[in-house]
Image: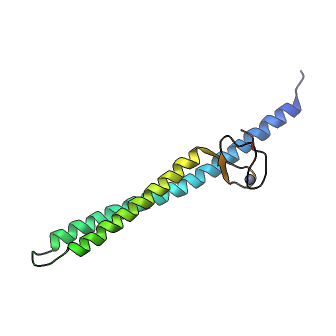
Amino acid sequence: MNFDFMKIKKEVTKTAIKAKKASANMVETAKYKFKLSEIKSDINEKYMQIGKLVYNSDEAEDIADKLQALCDEITSLKNSAQDIQATIDDMFNKKACPNCSSYVGKDYDFCPKCGNEIND
Ligand SMILES: [Zn+2]
């Protein structure tokens, strides 16, 4: 039998780099997804506060300002959620540099940050 050890070694190295990249990406994505779920539960909390405010108020009380403040907070939270979702989407269109872990476009052959060659 004739094994090409160099070829095998190269394939193993490639596979190891790919696995490292994939896990770095998954950890980052998980962090953002966790943040996203936190924001979503904050939004639900604000909706509940609006419901309680309306339910507990009597007709004489002017709750317009309080309602407006809660609505503004919800809008701001929704904007943050959109930004995070955009970041997650962006990460799926990128690959991580095996050397410095920064995310670069899928079509990059070299990392613009550290100059490391990036193989697929
Ligand atoms: Zn790099």
Residue 12, image x and y in percent? 78, 38
Looking at the image, which residue sits at the far bottom?
A: 60
In this rendering, position of residue 76 left or right of residue 52: right
In this rendering, position of residue 108 left or right of residue 26: right
Residue 10, image x and y in percent? 82, 36
Instruction: Please identify the quarter of the rendering in which residue 16 is found.
Output: top right
In this rendering, position of residue 49 left or right of residue 109: left
Q: Between residues 115 and 119, which one lies in front from this camera angle?
A: 115
In this rendering, position of residue 110 left or right of residue 88: right
At a point 35% along the width and 68% down the height, the residue shown is 73
Residue 63, image x and y in percent? 19, 74
Instruction: Please identify the quarter of the rendering in which residue 114 is found.
Output: bottom right
At a point 16% along the width and 77% down the height, the residue shown is 62
Looking at the image, which residue sits at the far top?
A: 1
Looking at the image, which residue sits at the far right?
A: 2
In this rendering, is residue 5 above or below 22? Answer: above
